Image: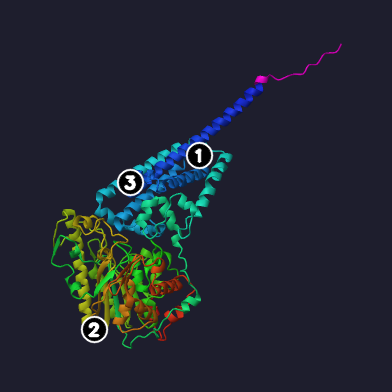
Amino acid sequence: MGRILTPTIAAPDADITTTSSEARAWLRGLGLFFGYLAIILLAAILITFGVEAVLRGSPGQAFAFLIDPSRPAPATVALIALTLIGVDALTRRPTQSVLIVAPVLLLLAWIGHEKRFYLGDPPYPTDFLYARQIVELMPLMVVERPMTGLLIALATIAGAALLFLLWRRSRFLPKTGLVGRVARLAIAIPPLFYFATHMDYASHSPLRSSMKISPKMWDQTANYQHNGLILAFSLNVPMANVAAPVGYSAQSMEAIAMDAGAAFVPARRPDIIMVMSESFWDPKRLPGVEITPDPIAFTRSIQSGHTFSPEFGGMTANAEFEALTGFSNAFLPYGSIPYQQYVRGEIPSLASFLKEEGYATLAIHPFQSWFWNRGNVYEAFGFDRFLSEENMEPLEKRGRLASDAALTDLLISEADASDDPIFAFAVSLQNHGPYEPGRYPDERIDVKSDGGEAARAAIHTFSEGMMDSDLAFKRLIEWAQKRKRETVIVFFGDHLPPLGQTYVSTGFMERTVSNRFGPPEELTRERETPLSVWSNRKGTIEDIGTISPAFLPLHVLRAADMKHPFYTGFLDAVHERWAVIDRHLAVGQDGSTREGWGRGALLDPLLRDYRLIQYDTMFGSRHGTERLFPPANAPLVAGRNNRINW
């Protein structure tokens, strides 16, 4: 009989063992993944808390932001968590993203905190355009706050060392496989992309509303207070793009009524000198302060009025932009810096107009030409030459910076040496803050203050600088009085000084910086700087009042008996109705005020046309340029272009 073959049957326990092992592995993997998500979520919460605590300067306020159901803290945490997951997919090691994302966001928060301390504004995406300026000014800030500077240096060294050690240890974390990396990207990228499409504040978004995100673009302090750093910063990203005003077209530009006539320059062509004096202001306005002698006695004696600066404590370039172009920052996105964002080609200015009329056009600033992008901007504005730190003989210093007296001597020598009529625009540097004690060893001023010794010392240093500026201005006027050539001089401050805690100590303001909006009388007090418009033929041009710097071209050309379709034509029509045009406040010539003038039905048709003209010239198709900025018929003076020096 043959062998009986019986089938071999595997032991049932083998399959069961294999299945349960796979299940355990799957469950273990799932547990690890959810554990990873829990760690990422916890890291995102801690980063959100840290960022808000640094920005706001208060852990309590940061905690209140996290637990307030009416504010979008959960959205912030979700965005940071998704970012961490996405970065982990790129680093291939779980949670390594924390060592990248957290330092970047905390650094941004610290920069924002310092910016609010000095300038009153939160951080904007446009701040990256002038990061080099901040680095250059760091030594000045450290001089004023040496202990803070030392702590920052020590914290930076300690933080960098800790980050280095943690990064080295993170290399021992297990690598994430391809499937895990793809899964992380699939989790992170779609919602981040979808969220990004809803960050245009100008369009309605149910997603934003459901997340409690409320764009408050008219009040950036409230914007950051409500939405937090990450979301408010993101809402400001689209503002770098200037959208066309409603109704902008060739037809709307043609419809703007203008009866300005042709440009006119008298045959005598007077010299025109404009001095924008750094932080020039009247310190006697501080309450409870006695200053003897009067540090700006001469300026006060020939004062024409005030400029209402668009900025406080800094951002000089924005006041300068208005003074040279006649355009207004009020028509540009909040936080923008036209010198760095928008000047990419030729833009009409006082310099380009006078250059066409045969003037030598000169800009002077005793610092480096890249600062505020001035080298490129002045060329785009039509200046023949720009004397900066790179191409001028070193000026004598007063304190740590080039003195106003030396700058005035340079202005005088350049004007005397010019065969052609000259338009010179100078930006001083001496009185740049901060105002540390002992900056000027030869004290001439006595200061008494109820605000404490720190405030008194800062006021004393600032007042010494104001006296120097005042004396330099006096010298410029005395020189012009002796000249045969007709000379027009304009002197004004760019903004109030960054005196910080001194404002609070003396009771001048409730905070260390000005509010962006508020009662008109409060804003006026916190933005006014002295203005003098003077001619050696007419004397002081009186009763100009308080005006936006954008109206300075009008008063300059009036003093010189010149006419221009935009500067003395259209601007004159606007100025007959409005004296100040700020983002949140318009002040009429009759003293009336209109807050929130730029929204909805409150927009005055004249201001609407002003906005259209500015957009058309700076960003649009220049439909109105031929009418508003016609080329001059006067021939250029031979040989003048040989003096160009960039």
Q: Residues within 10 Å of mark 2 (few under 14, many from 20)?
A: few
Q: Earlier in the sequence, mark 2 or mark 3?
A: 3
Figure quadrant of the N terminus? top right
Answer yes or no: is residue 219 visible.
yes
Real-space Cα separation, disc 1 to disc 2, in angstroms: 75 Å
Looking at the rendered structure, the kind of residue marked 1 is: Arg
Q: Secondary structure at mark 1?
A: loop
Q: Which mark is residue 105?
A: none
Residue 479: x percent and y percent?
22, 79
Answer yes or no: is residue 156 visible.
no
Q: Which residues are magenta?
A: 1-13
The extreme top residue here reads 1
Q: Is residue 11 magenta?
A: yes
Q: Secondary structure at mark 2?
A: loop
* Quadrant position of residue 329: bottom left
Q: Is residue 546 magenta?
A: no
The extreme front residue here reads 601
Q: Residues within 10 Å of mark 3 (few under 14, many from 20)?
A: some
* Quadrant position of residue 478: bottom left
**Picture layout, residue 413 above or below residue 402:** below
Q: Are marks 1 and 3 in contact (CB under 8 Å)?
A: no
Real-space Cα separation, disc 1 to disc 3, in angstroms: 34 Å
Real-space Cα separation, disc 2 to disc 3, in angstroms: 57 Å
Q: Which residue is mark 2?
A: 538
Q: Which residue is mark 3?
A: 61
Looking at the rendered structure, the kind of residue marked 3 is: Gln
